[in-house]
Image (cartoon, rainbow, N blue to C red):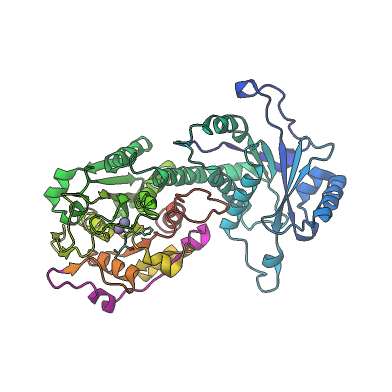
């Protein structure tokens, strides 16, 4: 697993004179990397007071001159890369634009920058630093954040998230990167007003980024390596963080009557698994209340089964376990930051393959709930997996609420693209809390409808329901199917087919597997279900 980068915090006031770059040889006998000083500049050459003090009038004049030459105006998320002026204990001076024009304009006057803005800013700086990440950052935005410590912590989180890479299978590139990591990445100093206040908050960001990294790596792993049993083993590794982990094998699932999930996996030589994770972090009254629950679709590879998918792009279906990956990453984040909450994470792990034992279109299976399902299309397998896991979690844990995450339908990409995940819920309050958490973390959700007319579309001639509802409203009928396995529990379903994998690179994510949902749900828990 990838270690999260070490970031130190220092006091802005203690910056001048700066710590000079070390002359001693770094690991591998090479000289330490040259140091970069990062400063912020708002629109119209506005610097924070500490920054001005640091670079002096001369430095400021120099930056202005260089900026004019290349028409750098300090717009948000732009950079001016300079050789450091004489007198600064740095080789490179990186001036980062923080904008302010749209936030300070008349209409948005009272709007504070969103926390995610600082994470994006951190990601942007990390991207500019690149491999030579031996840097001191004067965290002194010209327009002071509402919560300076929180902003600095978010900034550090953004730097970490940007730093993630998945190069396990790059045999040639690897050595170089490890060298860079050992030498440069361990040497980032963020100078802030009150370092102690930030250090407290930053623990949480470290836990969250570790969880995001776990989720991303699980999604990025190929399916020949990460099949259900291997996935379960990786979830078992959470034990070292104090998470209770139990694995249900085929015999246990048969005993429970999970015909829907088992039908999906029967065409594969790899055995299906369910993993139940529990973090009992609740103290006092929290220890006695009912747990909250998260459920993830973990189809380690989705060929479509007998209703096989076309070849083009099928390799992406190694990511059809992004929901399960998110649940594992979330449990890790909550455990690592010792969240004051009792939470269950449950994932259904299987592989959807064609073969002599595979389930056929027209087959009728009996789910754990007792309801029967006619399998019209074996490629609509995610809902079959979730049907049994959702039922099991309600039956066994009687949770306060369930949020499930699934790369469930291609139709959600048609509806929302890669900007928003689809949100379906039977509970307005839970829905609103999720949407709010999405806005703060940048993992955005858009609410989609549910209703009896859509529900009728999955009635079957031969069984209680069928697993597809026809061409129209594909994401809604899929959610409607799931709702038939929700027994009055407040529930939300997130269709992350467009956001969990292959999402466009952003300031905080350059990875194919995005880890979508970890930050979102960590935020949900922190804002409403702890302390
Ligand atoms: N895993 C797919 C959905 C998917 C598509 C995820 C694209 C990520 C990117 C799901 O199992 C599936 O195949 N859904 C079908 C349902 C249909 C057969 C009713 C789909 O969306 O086409
Ligand atoms: Mn499918
Ligand atoms: Zn699928």
Quarter of the picture holding the N terminus: top left
At a point 34% along the width and 39% down the height, the residue shown is 225
Judged from this view, the residue extending furthest toward the bottom is: 453
Instruction: Tell me if residue 456 comes above or below residue 412 in the rendering.
Output: below
Magenta range is: 437-464
Q: Indicate the position of residue 122 as horizontal and vertical percent values.
A: 61, 49
- Nearest the camera: 174 or 519? 174
Q: Is residue 5 left or right of residue 381?
A: right
Q: How far across and down, in percent of the image, does residue 509 sit?
A: 53, 50
Residue 282: image x %, image y %?
35, 48
**Residue 461 highlighted magenta (yes or no):** yes
Residue at 33 percent across and 60 percent down: it is 408
Q: Is any part of residue 329 visible from this angle?
A: yes
Asked if residue 358 is positioned above or below residue 380 in the image, the reply reads above
* Snapshot quadrant of residue 33: top right
Determine the residue positioned at 56% across, 33% down: 177
Q: Residue furthest front?
A: 311
Q: Is residue 426 visible?
A: no
**Residue 371 higher or lower than 348, as above or below:** below
Image quadrant, ligand 2? bottom left
State yes or no: residue 225 in magenta: no
- Position of residue 449 in the picture relative to residue 44 (left or right): left
Q: Number of labelled discs?
A: 0
Which residue is at the front of the view, 29 or 143? Answer: 29
Q: Residue at x 22, y 63 (%)?
A: 485
Q: Nearer the viewer, residue 348 or 47?
A: 348
Image spot of residue 466 (x, y percent): 20, 68
């Amino acid at each position: 697993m990838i270690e999260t980068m070490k970031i130190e915090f220092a006091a802005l006031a203690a910056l001048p004179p700066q710590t000079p770059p070390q002359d001693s040889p770094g690991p591998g006998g090479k000289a330490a990397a040259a140091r970069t000083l990062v400063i912020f500049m708002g629109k119209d050459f506005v610097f924070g007071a500490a920054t001005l003090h640091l670079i002096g009038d001369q430095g400021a004049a120099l930056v202005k001159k260089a900026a004019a030459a290349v028409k750098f105006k300090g717009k948000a998320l732009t950079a001016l890369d300079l050789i450091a002026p004489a007198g600064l204990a740095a080789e490179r001076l990186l001036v980062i634009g923080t904008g302010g024009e749209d936030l300070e304009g008349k209409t948005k006057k009272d709007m504070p920058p969103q926390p995610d803005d600082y994470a994006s800013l951190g990601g942007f700086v990390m991207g500019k630093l690149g491999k030579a990440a031996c840097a001191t950052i004067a965290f002194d935005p010209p327009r002071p954040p509402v919560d300076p410590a929180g902003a600095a912590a978010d900034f550090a989180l953004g730097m970490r998230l940007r730093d993630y890479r998945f190069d396990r299978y790059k045999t040639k590139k690897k050595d170089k990167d490890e060298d860079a990591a050992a030498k440069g990445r361990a040497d980032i100093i963020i100078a802030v007003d009150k370092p102690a206040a930030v250090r407290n908050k930053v623990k949480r960001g470290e836990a969250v980024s570790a969880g995001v990294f776990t989720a991303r790596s699980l999604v990025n792993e190929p399916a020949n390596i990460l099949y259900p049993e291997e996935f379960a083993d990786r979830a078992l590794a959470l034990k070292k963080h104090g998470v209770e982990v139990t694995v249900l094998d085929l015999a246990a699932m048969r005993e429970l009557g999970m015909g829907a999930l088992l039908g999906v996996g029967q065409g594969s030589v790899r055995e299906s698994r369910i993993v139940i994770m529990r973090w009992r972090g609740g103290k006092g009254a929290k220890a006695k209340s009912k747990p909250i629950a998260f459920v993830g679709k973990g189809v380690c590879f989705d060929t479509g089964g007998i209703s096989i998918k076309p070849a083009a792009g099928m390799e992406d279906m190694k990511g059809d376990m992004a929901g399960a990956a998110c649940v594992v990453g979330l449990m890790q984040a909550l455990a690592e930051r010792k969240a004051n909450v009792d939470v269950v994470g449950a994932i259904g792990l299987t592989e959807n393959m064609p073969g002599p034992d595979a389930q056929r279109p027209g087959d009728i299976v009996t789910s754990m709930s007792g309801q029967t399902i006619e399998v019209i299309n074996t490629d609509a397998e995610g809902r079959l997996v979730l049907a049994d896991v959702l039922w099991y979690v309600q039956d066994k844990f009687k949770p306060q609420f369930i949020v499930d995450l699934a790369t469930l339908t291609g139709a959600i990409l048609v509806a929302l693209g890669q900007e928003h995940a689809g949100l379906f819920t039977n509970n307005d309050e839970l829905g609103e809390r999720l949407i709010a958490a999405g806005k703060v973390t940048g993992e955005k959700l858009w609410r989609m409808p549910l209703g009896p007319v859509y529900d009728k579309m999955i009635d079957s001639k031969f069984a209680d329901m069928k697993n597809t509802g026809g061409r129209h409203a594909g994401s809604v009928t899929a959610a409607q199917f799931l709702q038939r396995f929700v027994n009055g529990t407040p529930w939300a379903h997130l269709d992350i087919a467009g956001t969990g994998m292959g999402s466009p690179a952003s300031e905080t994510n350059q990875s194919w597997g995005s880890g979508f949902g970890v930050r979102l749900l960590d935020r949900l828990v922190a804002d409403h279900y702890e302390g």
